[in-house]
Amino acid sequence: MSTVELASIPLVEIARKTRDASRKLGVLSTEAKNQAIAAIAEALESAASEIVAANQQDCQAAEKMGISKPLYNRLKMDETKLKATIAGVRDVGKLPDPVGQVQIHRELDEGLILKRVTCPLGVLGVIFEARPEAAIQISSLAIKSGNGVILKGGKEAIASCMAIVKAIRAGLAKTKIDPDVVQLLTTREETIELLKLDEYVDLIIPRGSNSFVRFVQENTRIPVLGHADGVCHLYVDEAADLEKAVAIAIDAKTQYPAACNAIETLLVHRAIAPQFLTAMAPKMAEKGVELRGDEATREALPEVKVATESDWSTEYSDLILSVKVVNDMDAAIAHITTYGSKHTEAIVTENNHTAEIFLAQVDAAGVFHNCSTRFADGFRYGFGAEVGISTQQMPPRGPVGLEGLITYKYKVVGSGQIAATYSGVNAKSFTHRDL
Amino acid sequence: MSTVELASIPLVEIARKTRDASRKLGVLSTEAKNQAIAAIAEALESAASEIVAANQQDCQAAEKMGISKPLYNRLKMDETKLKATIAGVRDVGKLPDPVGQVQIHRELDEGLILKRVTCPLGVLGVIFEARPEAAIQISSLAIKSGNGVILKGGKEAIASCMAIVKAIRAGLAKTKIDPDVVQLLTTREETIELLKLDEYVDLIIPRGSNSFVRFVQENTRIPVLGHADGVCHLYVDEAADLEKAVAIAIDAKTQYPAACNAIETLLVHRAIAPQFLTAMAPKMAEKGVELRGDEATREALPEVKVATESDWSTEYSDLILSVKVVNDMDAAIAHITTYGSKHTEAIVTENNHTAEIFLAQVDAAGVFHNCSTRFADGFRYGFGAEVGISTQQMPPRGPVGLEGLITYKYKVVGSGQIAATYSGVNAKSFTHRDL
């Protein structure tokens, strides 16, 4: 595989090849898939020096372009990081196989058996930032779940991704799996074209900036797993334990401010606002957090900047926090309904009845009581892997593990049964007996 | 509620009211919802003469417009049909509550508990044909699943639907449930506007012609439950039992040709084609089925019309069947992959190994062995109710019961836990213990 080859094949042909190869992958045994994952790990180890060299090339080019330090750190892939990533590949081999699980097993009538069985989606299109190890993680998760995958990494990581995908395909070539199940795109034009291939691509997973994810959502008919915004709230109820409330607020804002599950707005019950705000403000200041408050907040904390309407819908991804005093929980829920992004919403209260109402009435993928919003994460939930966090209304919702990469089909096996037997005047009854 | 009132309120306001009312409905107990369903049944009984009179008005108007007999039969709602439909409402009361089911219950750490709990989607938009009882069935299923619903029935059924929704709302007014959870739209303009309200409507269920469903799919960002096409195939393998194959083919084509799970194309293995085709043709002729065959089919059945390229992708919904002879199962699967609509695909064979490969490799919501495609149906699968059949790749797929109207949320309850405790050098471990 070379850039030249890639460029010369129309994307629709690449997608068709991926689909055809993935159809065969999808029916392989767990053992065969795990062998392929082991082969990928070995191939990556063999190609380690080549991959690290390609990454150095990417890093040098990026430095010349004046890449920021955090982005550089994501791009950089030295031998230690590669080793850790390869260990992650072997961990994927140990995960339970999400394919072939029988969800429903039912006798419709004697000798007429219905099974609902999990199966791969088909072909994934994954567009990710300039983080080379993502190509490795995603490929191994795709193969474990029986899916083909078309990868597109950030442009700064082109040489790294090409070296990685070359190694992965070389590893697959030694197994039963057609290397065409893993493909790499290298241009932005191909990304745009990929979004149009709804006949061949079954799920798009976009990673990156909010505006990029929104662009993808608005420009494809393929289902999109992910979320554009993470405008999360913490509501401090009048019956909150002050110490817990302050600790949770600090953690939810500052433990990793760029995370989608960090809070952007604090809603505080009027009855507890003076005590809570004066206890919280100095600790936020210590952590370098800039507060922006409504009028009532500024009564307690006059030094705080004025929050404007746009603050309530802004995901700062930074050490900035908007603060609003509310008259009651209904007002807090109404604010969340208007400005929230259905990601993760939390309440701090010692009143369990109040908490129950909040958890029931707030419509979000995650609703938390007396803990930090930062727990909203596939690894913390114990899913073993996270392919994305979904804020859509329909399942899969919230942090999505391997189950987000599978679907199911209904298999019905009979011995000549026809529907006419079960309709009309002398209709035979179904037994509908779960097995 | 009157037409005048409806027309005077902007649709976005109606949708907002429905959302707010449905949020309160969504947290009610099973008992409260079942009481509301009982109240609806009673209110419909009380309003029976009014509903039947409104329906007669619709029927007379439709007759003047020269409505076809099958459509007239769907539109007509006499006392018997109304009674049966009301009995169906009471049956919905008996269904298990799909809301509040705990799907995951896990200790993340001592005192930090994760639950994944099913909850309503929010607001459904259901656009259905001129069949008044659909308004009743859909409303009761929506309330059972805790959802608000905005209904739009076929224009020929306007008076019937208005009388029905008036009764349903009168019934709800006697319960804890805000009548605003059930709304009726009456114009096509409102339907178009409804498709744009992705902030307020969580799922669109379109029923009706293929072209209408496709129009909805292409003109909304709201998830759509349903399918435009049902191009289903029956593949008769070389190892098929001839008698079973003929019986299944006849049933799958003729038992209800307008159904989406009826077959449109028969694929026949070359080795069995002469015997099978000559055995099948006279029985299809008896049932009035017009066959359209490829060249090889016409060698065995010279009297059969020529199938053209467009036949392979046509859902006839009528007593017409296209027939193609294939060299092997791979060719049959390739044909299905190209022309199928991922609805229901069946194989007839006595070779179980062949059947397993077919069921594994064919990508469709339903894959059947030695039985009629007509079994692809929520009631026949024992789901108690069917809200639609989905041919999309992601779940819900295939016949969808009440579970298609729900989603889930993650609830995490702690006692002050923060993420910082579980990260860094002295990170505490999660226990991840299922409860």
Image (spheres, coloured by chain):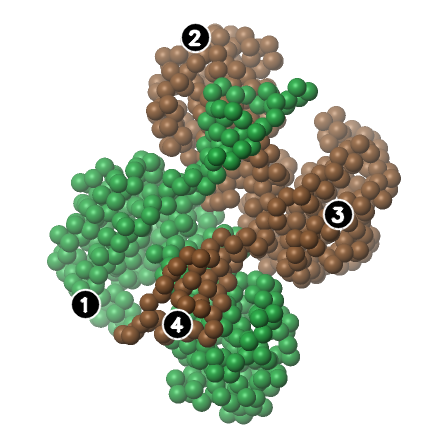
Chain colours: A green, B brown
Q: Is residue A174 above or below residue A354?
A: above
Q: Position of residue B21 (x, y in %)?
A: 69, 60
Q: Quadrant of residue B430?
A: bottom left
Mark 4 vs mark 1: give the one in front. 4
Q: How far apart, in angstroms, are the residues tagged by discs 4 and 1?
A: 35 Å
Residue at 57%, 71% (x, y): give it.
A352
Q: Name the residue that disc number 1 marks.
A: A60
Label 2, label 1: how far apart the Cα atoms are: 71 Å
* Distance Cα–Cα, label 3 vs label 1: 72 Å
**Of discs 2 and 3, which sits in the foreground?**
3
User: Residue B275 bears which disc, if any?
Assistant: 2
Using a 10 Å C-alpha cutoff, classify the residue at mark 4 as few (fewer than 14 neighbours), some (14 to 19) or many (20 or more): many
The amino acid at mark 1 is: Gln
Hey, what amino acid is under mark 3?
Ala
Chain ID at mark 1: A
Q: Which residue is mark 3?
A: B38
Secondary structure under badge 3?
A: helix
Characterize the local packing of mark 1: few (<14), some (14-19) or many (20 or more) Cα atoms within 10 angstroms: some
Neighbor class of circle 3 (other Cα within 10 Å; few <14, some 14-19, many 20+) is many
Quadrant location, the N terminus of chain B:
bottom right
Amino acid marked by disc 4:
Ala
Q: Position of residue B66 (x, y in %)?
A: 78, 28
- The residue to which callout 4 is attached is B419
Would you identify the image quadrant in which residue A268 lies? Answer: bottom right
